[in-house]
Amino acid sequence: SGTGNGAAAGEGEDPALHSPVSGFTTERVLRDSAREKTLFVHGKIDDQEAIVILEKTPIRQDTVDEMLKTSTLKLEMKNDIYSTYQLQAPAHLNEIKTTVICPATEKHVKKYLRQETFLIEESGDDYTAITLPYISSQSFSVQWVYNILEKKAEADRIIFEDPDPNIGFVLLPDFKWDQKQLHDLYLIAIVHRKDRKSLRDLTSDDLPLLKNIQEKGQEAIKKQYGVPPSKLRVYLHYQPSYYHLHVHFTSLEYDAPGSGVERAHLLSDVIQNLQADSQYYSSRTITFPLCADNALLLRFKEAGKL
Amino acid sequence: SGTGNGAAAGEGEDPALHSPVSGFTTERVLRDSAREKTLFVHGKIDDQEAIVILEKTPIRQDTVDEMLKTSTLKLEMKNDIYSTYQLQAPAHLNEIKTTVICPATEKHVKKYLRQETFLIEESGDDYTAITLPYISSQSFSVQWVYNILEKKAEADRIIFEDPDPNIGFVLLPDFKWDQKQLHDLYLIAIVHRKDRKSLRDLTSDDLPLLKNIQEKGQEAIKKQYGVPPSKLRVYLHYQPSYYHLHVHFTSLEYDAPGSGVERAHLLSDVIQNLQADSQYYSSRTITFPLCADNALLLRFKEAGKL
């Protein structure tokens, strides 16, 4: 532990095999957050477009004592009872979660580029006239979702499955969660049926599906992680980031990105609203944020709606 | 720079001088944030009460290329064009800001202690049987609100007023906003009428009031700060922090505390819901978070609702 010196295993051959990012060249920073300690970089790996996402990992409670014992500290400031230091920890206690998308498309670049955002108010008619044609024309690939549902990828990550074709779903950790602490617990339930794009498609016919996700999802998380329903925020996004119905489960303690009132819809509210009015989500004006360069935003602008 | 070896001064004697936290023993974690990569720990250093605050540092753009070249990576997951790794960086590129408070008092401990929160599901009947008696029994003082409405306090902070006793309100900056930049813009509209405690009291009779706040509040903010409605998140809290009806206006760019889906209700949704069903907010089950030491939480527990 603590050699911390970058030598990937088995040197001497193709280094890209061992460290796929060692040949990465930065072109530009797409986004960074000093608050969240993340950085999104666009660049190239061996002539291929690539995006590298770096995120420092949460500080683990169970390693604090070891870390404080085995780190070096450099004094920065001392004033009365307060002092501050720069601590250098052994590398294995201080990892950086790294996500590589390669080859990356222009869409990926746009997705991660920090943009000005605007609130859109989409009426039911706007959905039919503007948003639905946009979704259809883009033919967004959800192949990676089908890979999961068909166990062609990430099968070992699934923590629960109800295989029923109508009300079934798979539950697995979101990419954003490293599963090392419960504080930022984040799981996704992906439904087996392929004919529900988003909240807008839901009617009272979907109540058995939604209640099943709520009950069995909460139960599986309680069983697997010991986290009870009173500690879970369960919600859908609108707009979602992909048009295959899915539900987010995040720890209440965790101020999860995308859990703001402008984008998230509590599953318990969705269920109640559909119980009272089957057409609630097809008829209501729904508010959501869109980035400045989002192609859907452009369509709302062209329609004179912004 | 870059010697990276923690020796504050004069080696060879008491090691505590060099690494003041090496003898730290953890008693309990006061707070942690997986999103911000911080951890607040209470413990002891040489029999003295101490608090250690750890915060990972932001990822510096100017060190990314060096970091990717000199780190080791461990593959975690690969699916199509996406792969994730655990990256171990050289220690000097991945420091942890460490703050030590020693000796720490009970006040310091309380300041940093995060209270556990729980989600409550309050039905319309629960409101009548549990929450309303609680609000009445507490007779929370809203004298400070009346002082604002009557210009006995903060009169110079009001940026807009509609004096109408039924649909009027005052609009002023929230205390949390220092007004030095628009990024974290935060204003509050406080209604003149004194007979609306919260969302639960609203019916379709209140639509003129709510629409007035939405329209004139947005207009005043556009005029005063140049921020258009498409950049504003406008919402109510439930539970509110005081039981006199008020509406929050925050910048969409600002991830404002309390703007999460578990506590915030978009004013535009509230208006639509009351248009469709005058009893929407008196009859629905509403979900909200409460801290462990909140007196209302205790009442829900006593009623067997948690």
Image: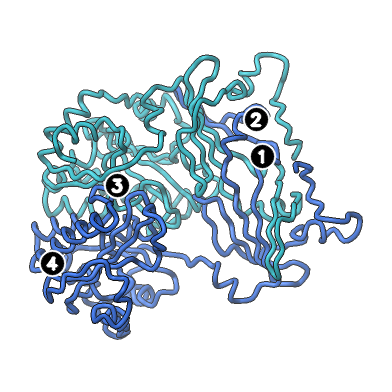
Chain colours: A cyan, B blue
Dot placed on the residue nearer the N-terminal end, 2 or 1:
2
Mark 4 vs mark 1: same chain? yes
Marks 2/1 in contact by CB < 8 Å: the verdict is yes
Q: How far from the left and from the top, in percent, is residue B31? A: 54, 61
> In front of the other: label 4 or label 3?
4
- Quarter residue A110 falls in: top left
Mark 4 vs mark 3: same chain? no
Mark 3 vs mark 2: same chain? no
The answer to whether residue A201 is left or right of residue A18 is left
Mark 4 highlights which residue? B209
Q: Chain of mark 1?
A: B
Marks 1/3 in contact by CB < 8 Å: the verdict is no
Q: Is residue A154 above or below residue A280?
A: above
For marks 4 and 2, give the CA distance. Answer: 58 Å
Q: At 10% from the left edge and 39% from the top edge, which residue is drawn?
A: A125
Dot placed on the residue nearer the N-terminal end, 4 or 1:
1
The answer to whether residue B27 is left or right of residue B31 is right
Q: At 74% from the left edge and 55% from the top edge, which residue is drawn?
A: A75
* Front residue (pair B294, A98): A98
Q: At 72% from the left edge and 52% from the top edge, which residue is drawn?
A: A66
